């Protein structure tokens, strides 16, 4: 009984933090996506402890199993991309049903009044223990994020144990088969889906996990010299790839190909003897390969493991003709504390998984970028996301500052290693954006642009820019 007073709240707490981590890492780090799971977690406490009428096993256990099936579907279909509303809905529905089951069982197992002090102490300790596991223990013992599946598995296991407590055996025989089936389903799905599965021509070389997420280096087509390549994946998003053959090693790939927005800028803007280039987001360092002798390239990267993997497995930084350096730390804070750098080109390419660091797309952030940009310099925003219409946000920022902008789309090509990309180029001067090569490659925003509010540090409306379809 005491074990369940401790364990059931711990499982619910693990799921609260695991679901919050999941949706913020893959969508955006904003207060709404912290508050929504927390609100549902607290609501389950209110309902379960207000009156026993709210928790009915015959209702909530099937709903919990349905929630498990929902997140299994979301994980299995992750690379095909679900609508963001459905994706969030599936995860928070599972969280709420899990919390209702865990807290409902804890309430059902409440003791007589003389033991309530111990009861509430263990209940509180369980919640704290779950938080400690996700925040401290899991990063030390796992190199991928599997807490969500472990929490579901633990909740199902403790629910199964709770069936034997407080009731006569005859009262729960009919439910045991359903619970055992659910437990087996969770275990099998968790084992299968806790990390991305290797394909026939693909294998993982290294996994790293830290506060910012999970990084994986993949090797593909090692038996085909022309297509042999390494890729860096962060969460659900690729951050770059490099062919391994000497003939193709220095070809810019992924979102940074020669016909991409940033590729056109790096090849055609200011062909002078020396340029200063700032890049927010290192990835595998692909953009460095565009550097010319006497160019100075400065990367801003918040995740030190990204730099370690970029130097260990990829050679773009080493092969660059320019002088390339990496400044570790939050790019905006670093630039706020620097003297003006007079960048000719400043590239904004900071993504964690598919999440958007929204503090880099506000009016105040734009003030910082313009401080470091030369009068005729170019800002290149990488806005490729599955769920959010960042194009409209950047166009609104450009209008606010009286800047000129051009939108350039890139398309996937497996032969050249190109991935689909969206870039918006912004500048105080029209000359470069009006050049023939940019005009030919750019796409007018037309009806795909929304009328959105100006993002500031005080007010960001993410719901306004959710895409109807990924």
Image (tube, rainbow, N blue to C red):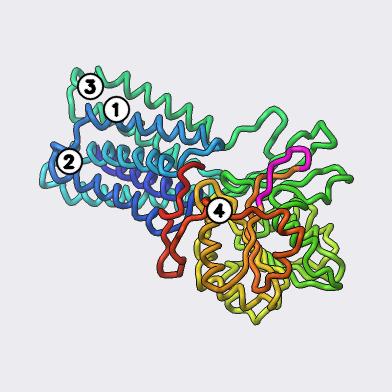
Q: Is residue 434 above or below residue 131?
A: below
Q: Is residue 100 left or right of residue 313?
A: left
Q: Depth check: 97 or 134 in front?
A: 97
Which label is found at residue 101?
none
Q: Secondary structure at mark 1?
A: helix
Q: Which residue position holds label 2?
A: 110
Q: Provide the residue span drawn in magenta.
A: 409-416
Say which label, 1 or 2, has the lower sequence index: 1
Q: CA distance from mark 3 to mark 1?
A: 15 Å
Q: How many marks?
A: 4
- Tell me residue 220's x, y (percent): 74, 36
Q: Which residue position holds label 4?
A: 446
Please identify, in this view, whether the residue under mark 1 or under mark 2 is nearer the observer.
1
Name the magenta segment's main secondary structure: loop
Q: Depth check: 203 or 130 in front?
A: 203
- Tell me residue 467's x, y (percent): 47, 47
Q: CA distance from mark 3 to mark 2?
A: 19 Å
Please identify, in this view, whether the residue under mark 4 or under mark 3 is nearer the observer.
4
Q: Depth check: 207 or 396 in front?
A: 396
Say which label, 3 or 2, has the lower sequence index: 2
Q: Is residue 409 above or below residue 304?
A: above
Asked if residue 257 is among those painted magenta in the image, a careful observer would answer no
- The crowd level at tag 4 (other Cα within 10 Å; few <14, some 14-19, many 20+) is few
- Say which residue appears at 81% left-offset and 68% top-offset: 323
Which quadrant of the structure image shows residue 331?
bottom right
- The crowd level at tag 2 (other Cα within 10 Å; few <14, some 14-19, many 20+) is some
Q: Is residue 5 above or below residue 424?
A: above
- Say which residue appears at 79% left-offset and 55% top-offset: 316
Q: Which residue position holds label 3?
A: 172
Q: Is residue 157 left or right of residue 104?
A: right
């Amino acid at each position: 009984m005491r074990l369940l007073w401790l364990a059931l709240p711990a499982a619910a707490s693990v799921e609260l933090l695991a679901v919050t981590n999941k949706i913020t890492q893959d969508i955006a780090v904003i207060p709404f996506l912290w508050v929504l799971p927390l609100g549902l977690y607290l609501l389950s406490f209110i309902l379960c402890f207000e009156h026993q009428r709210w928790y009915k096993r015959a209702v909530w256990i099937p709903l919990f199993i349905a929630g498990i099936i929902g997140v299994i579907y979301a994980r299995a279909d992750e690379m095909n991309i679900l609508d963001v509303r459905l994706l969030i809905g599936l995860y928070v529905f599972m969280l709420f049903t899990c919390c209702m089951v865990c807290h409902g069982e804890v309430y059902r197992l409440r003791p007589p009044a003389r033991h309530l002090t111990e009861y509430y102490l263990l209940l509180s300790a369980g919640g704290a223990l779950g938080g400690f596991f996700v925040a401290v223990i899991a990063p030390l013992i796992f190199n991928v994020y599997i807490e969500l599946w472990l929490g579901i598995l633990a909740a199902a296991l403790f629910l199964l144990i709770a069936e034997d407590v407080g009731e006569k055996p005859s009262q729960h025989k009919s439910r045991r088969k359903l619970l055992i089936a659910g437990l087996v389903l969770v275990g099998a799905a968790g084992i299968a889906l806790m990390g991305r599965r290797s394909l026939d021509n693909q294998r993982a070389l290294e996994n790293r996990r830290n506060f910012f997420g999970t990084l994986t280096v993949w090797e593909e087509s090692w038996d085909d010299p022309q297509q042999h390549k390494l890729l860096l994946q962060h969460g659900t998003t690729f951050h770059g790839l490099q062919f391994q053959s000497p003939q193709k090693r220095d070809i810019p790939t992924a979102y940074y190909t020669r016909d991409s927005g940033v590729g056109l800028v790096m090849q055609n803007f200011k062909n002078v003897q020396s340029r200063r280039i700032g890049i927010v987001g290192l990835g595998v360092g692909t953009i460095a390969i565009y550097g010319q002798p006497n160019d100075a390239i400065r990367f801003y990267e918040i995740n030190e493991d990204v730099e370690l993997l970029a130097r260990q497995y990829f050679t773009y930084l080493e092969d660059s003709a320019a002088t390339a350096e990496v400044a570790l730390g939050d790019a905006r804070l670093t630039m706020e504390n620097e003297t003006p750098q007079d960048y000719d080109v400043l590239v904004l390419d900071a993504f964690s998984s598919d999440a958007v660091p929204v503090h880099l797309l506000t009016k105040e952030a734009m003030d910082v970028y313009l401080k470091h940009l030369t009068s005729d310099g170019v800002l290149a925003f990488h806005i490729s996301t599955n769920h959010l219409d960042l194009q409209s946000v950047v166009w609104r920022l450009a209008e606010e500052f009286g800047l000129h902008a051009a939108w350039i789309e890139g398309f996937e090509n497996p032969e050249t290693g190109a991935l689909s990309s969206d870039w918006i180029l912004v500048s105080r001067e029209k000359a470069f954006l009006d050049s023939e090569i940019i005009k030919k490659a750019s796409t007018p925003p037309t009806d795909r642009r929304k009328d959105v509010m100006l993002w500031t540090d005080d007010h960001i409306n993410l719901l306004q820019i959710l895409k109807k379809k990924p």
